[in-house]
Amino acid sequence: MESVYKLVEIIGTSDKSWEDAAKVAVKTASKTLRDLRVAEVKEMDMKIEDGDLVFRVKMNLSFKYED
């Protein structure tokens, strides 16, 4: 069986944790992308806004092309 997948880069943010930032990113992407396959975390960092931390996760997300 042959398949083709598309890879996109997304960034999720959260004021709670990196894990929450990743969940937010995938949940949001799943509203417009179907058949999500793999989320690969590429980079994690924190942004400081007015003394508060914002957790950011950059990830690659793959989904299958439809016929």
Image (cartoon, helix red, strand yellow):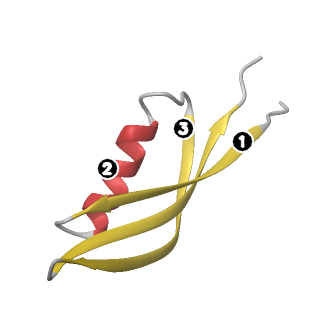
Relative to 62, say whether 32 is above or below.
Answer: above
Q: In the picture shown, does residue 5 fall above or below 59?
A: above
**N-terminal-most mark, 2 or 3:** 2
Mark 1 residue type: Lys
Image quarter hosting the N terminus:
top right
The part of the image, by quadrant, that contains residue 18 is bottom left
- Give the quarter of the image for residue 46: bottom left
In this figure, which residue is indicated by the disc labeled 3? 36
SS at circle 3? strand
Q: Helix, strand or loop at disc 1? A: strand
Residue 63 point in image, percent of width and height: 62, 38
User: Extreme front residue here?
Assistant: 50
Classify residue 40 as left or right of residue 16: right
Q: Residue at x 36, y 41 (%)?
A: 27
Which residue bears the numbered disc 2? 24
Q: Is residue 66 left or right of residue 33?
A: right
The type of residue carrying mark 2 is Val
Residue at the spot of label 1? 6
Mark 2 surroundings within 10 Å by alpha-carbon count, few (fewer than 14), some (14 through 19), many (20 or more): some
Seen at 39% across and 79% down, the residue is: 45
- Mark in front: 2 vs 3: 2
